[in-house]
Amino acid sequence: MTALRRFFGFVGPGFLVAVGYMDPGNWATDLAGGSEFGYALLWVILLANLMAILFQHLCVRLQVATGQDLAQACRARYSPVVSTFLWISAQIGIIAMDLAELLGSAIALQLLFGIPLFIGSLITALDVLLLLALMRLGYRWLESIVAVLVLTIALCIGAELLIAQPAIHSVLQGFIPTGEVFKNPGMLFIALGILGATVMPHNLYLHSSLVGSRDLGKTVEERKQAIRFATYDSSLALVFAFFVNAGLLILSAAAFHHAGQPPVTDIREAYQLLNGALGSTIAATLFAVALLASGQNATITGTLAGQIVLEGFLKIKGKAWMVRTFTRLAALVPALFVIAYAGEGKAVELLLWSQVILSLQLGFACWPLVRITTDKKLMGIYVAPGWVKYLGIMGTIIVVSASIWFVFSVI
């Protein structure tokens, strides 16, 4: 009973991390993938989710063994030049992530209330005030509100899947890997976007810090137990996120992937077509409500990740609300500029490209994490086992290879 009570003490950070795996970027990539290629990319979502579980486990090990998050560990291990490069890479990833969250929430506000996209982005940008207020109450309040928003997303997607009634055989077939993704540039583009939307670099910095908010214990046995319980927390939350992501692609495939129908890549177009495609007057509203909850959730965790990256790499210390406001503005200003410059017609294209940019930054977060957590000199008895090390290296190679493949495809 004591162990169970201690496990519940570790529940929470996993859900804060998991919201990044069901953000508006996922909506864009899953919608495009399902409408254009049916269920064929479900195996990519599964692979990306398994990789995410592995990398988040390494984040737990890092914090328990060293008392540092990934940003702090990179600064301590690497030269100032390398450390600065890694910080710039992380900041680019956070800007791309914030662009996706702003656009997703703004699109949802436009669909529900007719608010122009740029005004909706400004409204969403003010959620930092909500974050600052919640953080005064402690992490538990924040985790509870995030959990409610996650449940809202899941219930909306679940209800729409019940309405859509996808073919189970076709769904199961979609989890079988095929080589077609490497032959079709369009499919590769979406697959890379799914990878970037699922294994998000800022989540590695976020989770490696959040675990430190728990009582990790003092003895070796207590700390090993902390690694297990924190891993259970993140893994269960990511399994939950997997069903949401897979549900989005399945919904898109069931509603829009039909012979003679062009792919639906615009979230606003999907909203307009959903009621007719599923024969329900509530389907589009559920879609928009879930999208809004998704965007609001992800902006909260994105702001926390920005603070962790800034403090860890640059050792900037100050009042928490000042640091969070600064990091929020550092990501918001470029994102708002891109939205204003590109205009409403490019919204979904920006969403897709933001996920590709995230995937291109992944290697610069995954490789240091794997190298540090497999360093016996640094990690001591908490060093990652050999099989975890090789899976981590393999996952990083997949991420980097996919990114290089994509760049050459574009060229």
Image (cartoon, helix red, strand yellow):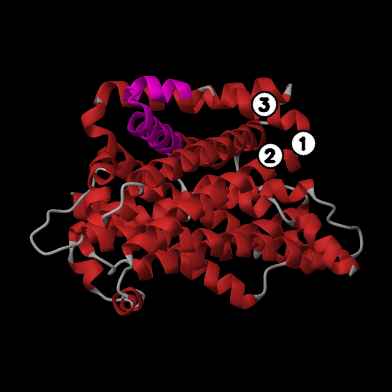
Give SS at disc 3: helix
Q: Which residue is mark 1?
A: 138
Q: Are marks 3 and 2 in contact (CB under 8 Å)?
A: no
- Judging depth in this view, the residue of 30 and 193 nearest the camera is 30
**In the figure, 238 relative to 127: above or below?**
below
Numbered range of the magenta stretch: 96-123
The local crowd at label 2, few if under 14, some if 14 to 19, many if 20 or more residues have their Cα within 10 Å, is many
Q: Is residue 301 magenta?
A: no
Give SS at disc 2: helix
Q: Are marks 1 and 2 in contact (CB under 8 Å)?
A: yes
Marks 1/2: CA–CA distance: 7 Å
Tell me which corner region of the image, top left, top right, bottom left or bottom right, holds residue 10.
bottom right
Q: Which mark is residue 263?
A: none
Q: Which quadrant: the N terminus?
A: bottom right
Residue 215, image x, y percentages: 85, 52
**Residue type, numbered disc 3:** Leu
**In the figure, 386 relative to 360: above or below?**
below
The local crowd at label 3, few if under 14, some if 14 to 19, many if 20 or more residues have their Cα within 10 Å, is some
**Residue type, numbered disc 1:** Gly
Marks 1/3: CA–CA distance: 10 Å
Q: Which residue is mark 2?
A: 142
Q: Is residue 121 magenta?
A: yes
Residue 189, image x, y percentages: 26, 55
Q: Residue at x 61, y 64 (%)?
A: 235
Residue 286, image x, y percentages: 41, 46
Q: Which residue is mark 3?
A: 132
Give SS at disc 1: loop
**In the figure, 146 relative to 109: above or below?**
below
